[in-house]
Image: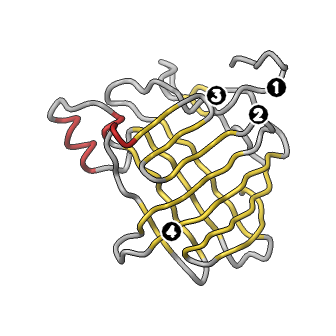
Amino acid sequence: MAVAESNRPASPDFNLTVPPRGYAWWYVDALSDDGQHGLTLIAFIGSVFSPYYFKGRRKGRNDPRDHCSMNVCLYGEKRRWTMTERHANAVNQTETNLTIGPSAIQWNSDDTLTLQLNEIGTPIPQRVRGTIYLTPNFINERIFTLDRNERHRWRPIAPSARVTVELEHPNIKWTGHLF
């Protein structure tokens, strides 16, 4: 893993080139301090849960950027689930930013993560819109290979962090931690 010139750890590198038939994802799992609220967020390039991507790969349509989504699950009193699949023209990647449709993730210069969400839930169309802030307690730079061919890699970037959730829709505000 590269280290920036300032000796700060490199960003999560949202600008990964995902090979045909491949996938990449960035995952956040958090729980409120009072245990009443939770969230899971997965940003996908090449959604492994997509039946369209699975079917397309069988027909030779292998571009993972044509199967991207910002999957959000909210737990607690106001539950929501989103997973709108978007094509490559709705995706923008840089090393520090990933935009999928109207939602975005940004790695900030102070080594924090900001998630701007603007999604529609399913199966009942309900808006999920607002901001999530993640402040790591430390940054892991180690990458673990999960198979002999080193095609599957895992890097828990911030395995310990504080989370602040400020959603407008549904109206939810809480602080908590990753778990």
Tag 1 or tag 3, which sits nearer the N-term? 1
Find the distance from the CA under tag 2 to the CA under tag 3.
Answer: 11 Å
The residue depicted at 41 percent of the width and 39 percent of the height is 91
Q: Element type at marker 1?
A: loop
Find the distance from the CA under tag 1 to the CA under tag 4.
Answer: 33 Å
Within-10-Å neighbours for mark 1: few <14, some 14–19, many 20+: few
Give residue 70's position: percent from left, percent from top: 47, 52
Tag 2 or tag 4, which sits nearer the N-term? 4
Within-10-Å neighbours for mark 4: few <14, some 14–19, many 20+: many
Which quadrant does the C terminus fall into? bottom right
* Farthest bottom residue in view: 77
The residue depicted at 34 percent of the width and 37 percent of the height is 88
Residue, disc 4:
128
Q: Quadrant of residue 122?
A: bottom left
Give residue 149's position: percent from left, percent from top: 47, 18
Which quadrant does the N terminus fall into? top right
Callout 3–callout 1 Cβ contact below 8 Å: no
The residue mark sitting in front, 2 or 3, is: 2
Within-10-Å neighbours for mark 3: few <14, some 14–19, many 20+: few
Residue, disc 2:
140
Amino acid at dot 2 = Asn
Q: Quadrant of residue 96?
A: top right
The residue depicted at 79 percent of the width and 46 percent of the height is 136
Find the distance from the CA under tag 2 to the CA under tag 1.
Answer: 11 Å
Tag 4 or tag 1, which sits nearer the N-term? 1
